[in-house]
Amino acid sequence: MIDWFRGSIPFLHFPVNGGHLFEMTPDGVVKWDIVKGVQVQGSHKSNISIRSKGSDGQGRATELWIDGNISKFLQGHNLFGSRNLIDLVHQTFLKIVNYHPDLEPRTLNLASVEQSILSGDFDVKSIDINQLYFLDNNRSVESWLYAAEMHASKRAGRSTSTRGTVYLGKNSRRWGLKFYNKKQEMLVNQNKDHPHFQKLITFAEGLLRVELRLLSLELTDLGLTKGRQFTVERLEKLFNSYLGRIDMTMNAHLIDEELINLPRTVQGTYHLWKSGVSCRQMLSKTSFFRHRKELKKYGVDINFPPLQVERNNVQPLIRVIEAKPVENPVWATELKLIA
């Protein structure tokens, strides 16, 4: 899905009054003057910033800059969504015009502006492309993130971690990737008043979010500066290309659901048994029979080897996310949760 977008739309309009930031010399000469952006509220208390730029010499601005999470602005959440950038920008523009009286749309020809947007005639300065991956449960997501923090790297340097989010190229002026536990992020940042909050949180269980941010310098070098260039196919190729630049050859130990539900006192024994180790040889006689009795409550008999030794819960970092991308759920469309 498309998440954050920063860019400008050619739009002749009366400037949005967000105030000014300027520097003045001691003798009263203004050295520079920047028009501040204003916040526009979207669905379920999600905001984006807009700013007027340019001038036609008659008191009207010529560009409308948009900076924010356009999917969350339209949907009220950014758990999943669309990669149709043109459609998202078009919907965002209409919502801004309808809700912001300072633009005075009645006096201007909005149809021509809409046509320009639908033709992809707008500038893209920064864009986030996201993908969700299913790792079975929350603890597996945390294990994957820990392994990525320790071992993942790109040519410009190692990964860094802040509050559970793993970054590659966090301070780069060109591009960067970040990885995080989507459920944990939503518990902190998602508006709890959303009518489908609980359904969204339930769906987010066990989901790893991978987010690619492409900034202006990188987009310019790629020759990608106009909305019409960002087709769904191009966005997918870009995402996969940059993800492929990351060195993630080390392994992550994923946690299976059965292990999570077991009492802590027998989790180690279960892990040994499932790996093919003889628990009778590893445990004292008393511990063996005590653990056997406890585990039989969960359908596990450590007196016999497992039918198949489980080894694939230790997997290369990159293989995990290559194998399990998550598509938008059918019910999301039915509930109108996708813009």
Image (cartoon, rainbow, N blue to C red):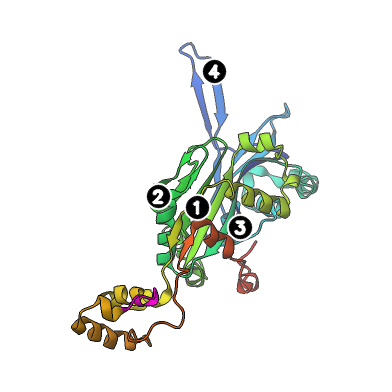
| Cα–Cα gap, marks 3 and 2 | 36 Å
Label 1, secondary structure: give it: loop
Q: Nearer the viewer, mark 3 or mark 2?
A: 2
Q: Please state which amino acid type lies under the numbered disc 3.
A: Leu
Q: Residue furthest top?
A: 27
Q: Callout 4: few (<14), some (14-19), or many (20+) C-alpha neighbours within 10 Å? A: few
Q: Is residue 284 above or below residue 52?
A: below
Q: Which residue is mark 4?
A: 31
Q: Of the two numbered discs 3 and 2 on the same chain, state the one appearing first in sequence.
A: 3
Q: Nearer the viewer, mark 4 or mark 1?
A: 1
State which quarter of the image contains the N terminus: bottom right
Question: What type of secondary structure mainly makes up the magenta span?
Answer: loop
Q: Is residue 203 above or below residue 14?
A: below
Q: Which residues are magenta?
A: 273-278
| Cα–Cα gap, marks 1 and 2 | 12 Å
Q: Is residue 288 left or right of residue 206?
A: left
Q: Nearer the viewer, mark 4 or mark 3?
A: 3
